[in-house]
């Protein structure tokens, strides 16, 4: 069981992976949630697709004064050096957003390996009708405000802990 990790979730403004407009982080140490943190981000490039806003409800007005990714990263980068893994539900998406934002900001650095709770749920809970975050969260009675980055990250953290017990 992995019990020292950061669960992460991004919301994006448009089709570009570098367009993160919200981030949620939940830090787990010794199997316990010890910190939760979230922020809006001014996306790069700065435009919103209709479908993105329809999914998460974040608008250009909400992020016009938000920090750029590099400002956010300066606050959180050290957290990633102290964990064993990055956990996300659909980790390939969230990791690609993180990588694209780092590349756009020209930031190099170490990132731990990632674990995908979607893939883990498919393996350990094959009987579920699907393995979307809301479905698996409902199965474990985990509260979820879906597409709120911090709520999604919290759910991923709790899912990782629950799936590790199976």
Image: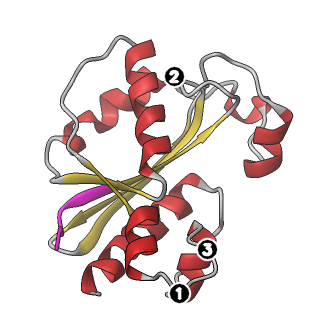
Q: Secondary structure at mark 2?
A: loop
Secondary structure character of the magenta stretch overall = loop
Q: Secondary structure at mark 3?
A: loop
Given contact means CB atoms under 8 Å apart, are the residues at marks 2 and 3 in contact? Answer: no
Which circle marks residue 153 in the picture?
none
Q: Secondary structure at mark 1?
A: loop
Relative to 128, say whether 93 is above or below. above
Q: Is residue 78 left or right of residue 127?
A: left
Q: CA distance from mark 3 to mark 1?
A: 8 Å
The spot of residue 164 in percent (x, y) is: 26, 78
| Residue range (magenta) | 1-6
Residue at image x 83%, y 47%?
Answer: 54
Q: Quadrant of residue 165?
A: bottom left
How crowded pointer 3 is (Cα within 10 Å; few <14, some 14-19, many 20+) is rated as some
The spot of residue 49 in percent (x, y) is: 80, 30
The spot of residue 81 in percent (x, y) is: 15, 41
Instruction: Report whether residue 143 is seen.
Output: no
Residue picked out by circle 3 = 130
Residue at image x 64%, y 80%?
Answer: 129
Mark 2 or 1: in front is 1
Of the image marks 2 and 3, the number of the one nearer the N terminus: 2
Q: In the rendered view of the protein, which quadrant contains the N terminus?
A: bottom left
Residue picked out by circle 1 = 127
Q: Quadrant of residue 130?
A: bottom right
């Amino acid at each position: 069981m992995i019990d020292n990790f950061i669960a992460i979730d991004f919301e994006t403004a448009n089709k570009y992976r570098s367009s993160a407009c919200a981030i949620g982080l939940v830090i787990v140490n010794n199997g316990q949630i010890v910190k939760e943190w979230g922020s809006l981000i001014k996306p790069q490039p700065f435009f919103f697709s209709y479908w993105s806003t329809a999914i998460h409800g974040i608008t250009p007005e909400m992020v016009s004064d938000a920090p750029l990714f590099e400002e956010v990263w300066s606050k959180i980068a050290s957290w990633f050096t102290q964990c064993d893994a990055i956990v996300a539900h659909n980790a390939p998406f969230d990791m690609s957003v993180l990588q694209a934002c780092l590349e756009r900001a020209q930031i190099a650095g170490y990132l731990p390996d990632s674990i995908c709770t979607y893939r883990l749920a498919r393996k350990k809970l094959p009987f579920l009708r699907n393995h979307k975050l809301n479905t698996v969260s409902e199965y474990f009675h985990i509260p979820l405000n879906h597409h709120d980055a911090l709520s999604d990250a919290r759910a991923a953290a709790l899912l990782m802990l629950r799936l590790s017990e199976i």
